[in-house]
């Protein structure tokens, strides 16, 4: 039987203390230089080091594991797994991994080093990464050899990385064209940033709606966002339609407007994006842009399987979106 690799062996090979190697393994890299941390991660991966607890669990459960890592961004205010889009995405990935006889392990992180430690600690088939930026994907590729698939990237992928995108621009354009057909002449787009997929949704919306489309960048913190709306309630009344780049922001705005006596859709039509379960928690039900989370999960796991087999794939695939019209919007 092959002798188990010990942490002390790796520390000795690198000329480091066992404590330093342990810190890197568990993501505690505050006292370690990035160069040293990268050396340790590479050695852990190359030697196939697994902590004893992980070895026991893997021995008892031989099923292959896919890791799903979600960026615990500050805007979620420590409630990321309660977000309707994230929950819908995890539900689809869980169903697809089960269908293939795989196990899914979920981790939320706010530091890239935690992803590398997670990937090193477990003998993963691959990773699905959600909510990170393109620069993060590039850094991860430089520090990990296992294949990973990303949700929402804009062309910065490198070897053994594959992006499963959706047609954000096309979805935004559908909303803009729909509002214009409904007779609206001034329409507003709301987002908490103007980058990557949110930028694409706004750009598509502006293209579809044409002259009269406006953009407001809203605060990420809920308390600040509601104060932002309070200060601009009169300005909001100048628009007859609002497109929020997520269902969460659309539902929140609908509640805010209704609480201030603004009738939806009689005075303002409201549309979201993602077509999550939130669309049914407001009255009237929310118009939204649908993305197929099941198709996305299938595509992601297909790509992981092929990357694992050493295949070279195109950098990305873009899945279609579809506007689903409900009672929160109307003809003028």
Image (cartoon, rainbow, N blue to C red):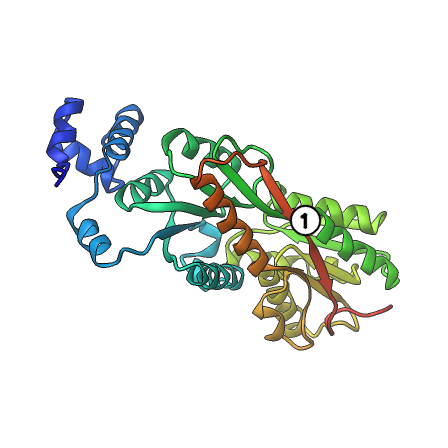
- Provide the secondary structure element on which disc 1 rests: loop
Location of residue 21 (image quadrant): top left
Q: Indicate the quadrant containing the C terminus: top left, top right, bottom left or bottom right.
A: bottom right
Work out whether residue 138 or residue 294 is closer to the camera in this orientation and state it: 294
Which residue is at 37% across, 46% downward?
Answer: 125
Residue toward you, 188 or 276: 276
Task: Tally the marks.
Answer: 1
Residue 227 on image: x %, y %: 57, 59
Query: How far across and down, in percent of the image, does residue 305 sit?
Result: 46, 46
Quarter of the image that includes the N terminus: top left
What residue would you read off at disc 1? 167
Q: Position of residue 42 (x, y in %)?
A: 29, 29
Q: Is residue 142 left or right of residue 163?
A: left
For the point 45% across and 64% down, the residue is: 82
- Image coordinates for residue 311, horizontal then vertical, percent: 50, 36
- Judged from this view, the residue extending furthest toward the bottom is 283
* In this view, 168 is above or below 223: above
């Amino acid at each position: 039987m092959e002798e188990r690799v010990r942490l002390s062996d790796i520390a000795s090979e690198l000329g480091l203390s066992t404590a330093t190697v342990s810190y890197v393994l568990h993501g505690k890299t505050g006292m370690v230089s990035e160069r040293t941390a990268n050396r340790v991660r590479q050695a852990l991966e190359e030697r196939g080091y697994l902590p004893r607890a992980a070895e026991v669990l893997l021995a008892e459960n031989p099923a292959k594991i896919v890791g799903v890592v979600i960026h615990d961004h500050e805007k979620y205010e420590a409630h990321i797994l309660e977000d309707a889009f994230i929950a819908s995405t995890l539900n689809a990935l869980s169903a697809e991994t089960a269908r293939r006889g795989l196990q899914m392990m979920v981790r939320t992180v706010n530091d890239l080093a935690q992803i590398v430690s997670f990937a090193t600690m477990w003998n993963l088939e691959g990773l699905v990464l959600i909510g990170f930026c393109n620069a993060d994907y590039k850094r991860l590729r430089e520090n990990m050899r296992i294949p990973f698939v990303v949700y929402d990237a804009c062309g910065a992928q490198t070897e053994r990385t594959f992006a499963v995108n959706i047609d954000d621009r096309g979805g935004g354009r559908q909303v803009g064209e729909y509002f214009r057909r409904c007779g609206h002449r001034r329409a507003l787009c709301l987002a908490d940033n103007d980058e990557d997929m949110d930028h694409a949704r706004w750009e598509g919306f502006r293209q579809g709606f044409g002259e009269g489309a406006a953009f407001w960048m809203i605060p990420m913190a809920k308390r600040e966002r509601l104060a932002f709306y309070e200060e601009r309630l009169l300005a909001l009344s100048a628009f007859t339609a609002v497109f929020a780049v997520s269902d969460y922001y659309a539902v929140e705005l609908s509640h805010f407007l209704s609480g201030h006596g603004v009738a939806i859709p009689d005075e303002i039509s409201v549309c979201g994006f993602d077509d999550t379960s939130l669309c049914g928690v407001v009255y009237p039900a929310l118009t939204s842009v649908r993305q197929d989370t099941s198709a996305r999960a299938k595509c992601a796991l297909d790509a992981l399987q092929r990357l694992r087999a050493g295949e070279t794939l195109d950098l990305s695939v873009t899945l279609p979106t579809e506007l689903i019209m409900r009672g929160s919007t109307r003809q003028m």
